[in-house]
Amino acid sequence: MLKQNILLEIEKKREELIRVVRVSGLNSPPAIKHSQELDHLLNIYNNTPSQHSDTTST
């Protein structure tokens, strides 16, 4: 999965989380579920290599 695609998914999930929190509250089960899904996407993003590799060595 491309990092750019993951970023789009992260943004969608973040917006969903904000909407759910406004309706259900921060500690509601739906908010916690969305938060965990967002965490999962962020972990995928952080563990996905960049498109271009930096071959410069020091």
Image: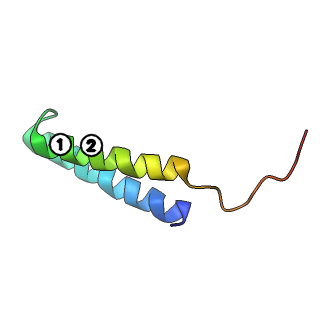
Q: Give the left or right position of residue 29, taking residue 53 as reference.
A: left
- Residue, disc 1: 31
> Residue 54 placed where, x, y %?
79, 52
Q: Nearest the camera: 22 or 42?
A: 42
Left or right placement of residue 58 versus residue 23 in this view = right
Q: Residues within 10 Å of mark 2 (few under 14, many from 20)?
A: many
In the image, 23 versus 44, the foreground residue is 44
Residue type for callout 1: Ala
Q: Is residue 19 above or below residue 1?
A: above
**Camera-nearest residue between 2 and 16:** 2
Tell me the number on the disc at residue 6.
none
Residue type marked 2: Ser
Quadrant including the C terminus = top right
Q: Which residue sits furthest right? A: 58
Residue 3, placed above or below residue 33: below
- Is residue 9 toward the left or the right of residue 54 in the image? left
Asked whether disc 2 touches disc 1, contact meaning CB atoms under 8 Å apart, the reply is yes
> Picture coordinates of residue 30 (x, y %)?
13, 46
Residue 54 falls left or right of residue 32:
right
Disc 2 is placed on an element classified as: helix
Residue topped by disc 2:
35
Q: Position of residue 50 (x, y in %)?
A: 65, 56
What element does badge 1 sit on? Answer: helix
